[in-house]
Amino acid sequence: GQNIDQPTEMTATEGAIVQINCTYQTSGFNGLFWYQQHAGEAPTFLSYNVLDGLEEKGRFSSFLSRSKGYSYLLLKELQMKDSASYLCAGGLYTDKLIFGTGTRLQVFP
Amino acid sequence: DAGVTQSPTHLIKTRGQQVTLRCSPKSGHDTVSWYQQALGQGPQFIFQYYEEEERQRGNFPDRFSGHQFPNYSSELNVNALLLGDSALYLCASSLDSQGDQPQHFGDGTRLSIL
């Protein structure tokens, strides 16, 4: 089967670092994607990993371990505007995305 | 360079009616996927179109159908609307790939069923 798990909610303080974990049990995943979604808006692509390891993109980094079925999104120097839902999604070889339910991050001053 | 565009933005229908949602993919993209997102949930895959054909389908009833045109734009049709069809409908476009290319989403159509 295909399943993606991530925490429902997280809180953090402005300027801090937060790590959002994602675990998956599936066959046929070729890439692991992270999207940001503000309330009432569409998901915005943040990063993706096809190979194991860390991908860095400004304040955002994403990590993948295929052998462990594990990924995380790291957000540094948190800003108030980072308050949003963060969606972990697996990309199947068939080019279909399987999403988790999303992690709602609240950043406090 | 225009991104993915969807219309309409909002729509209100009553049970039993039919609805058509439209999507234009990002320039250069040839694959269009449709997703349904209920409140507080992640998007759920409905189906995907490539070369004007439905290439794969998620766990949605036949009331959900679609079409892709030669210019790669796409439509999602839903017949016999139910209250449970109320959701944000997202269109995503990408280059044909094997799950290793990001999909880019439009702003969505928020469908409310009364």
Image: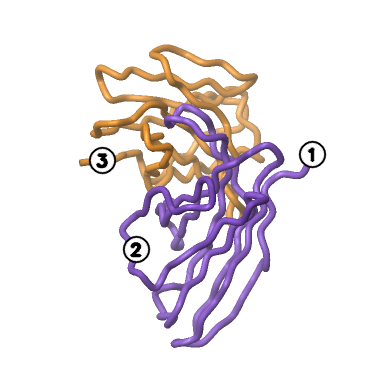
Chain colours: A orange, B purple
Relative side of B56 to B50, left or right: left
3D distance between C-alphas at marks 1 and 3: 35 Å
Q: Residues within 10 Å of mark 1 (few under 14, many from 20)?
A: few
**Is residue B2 depicted above or below A23 in this figure?**
below
Residue A28 appears in view: yes
Residue at image x 68%, y 37%? Answer: B28
Residue at image x 66%, y 40%? Answer: A81
Rendered image: mark on residue A2: 3
Q: Indicate the secondary structure of the residue bearing disc 3.
A: loop
Residue type of the residue flagged with mark 2 = Phe
Residue at image x 55%, y 72%? Answer: B111
Residue B105 at x, y = what percent?
A: 59, 47
Residue B14 at x, y = what percent?
A: 51, 87
Q: Nearer the viewer, mark 3 or mark 2?
A: 2
Rendered image: mark on residue B1: 1
Relative side of B8 to A13, left or right: right
Q: Do the residues labelled 1 and 2 touch (CB within 8 Å)?
A: no
Which chain's residue wears label 1? B
Residue type of the residue flagged with mark 3 = Gln
Residue tagged by mark 2? B60
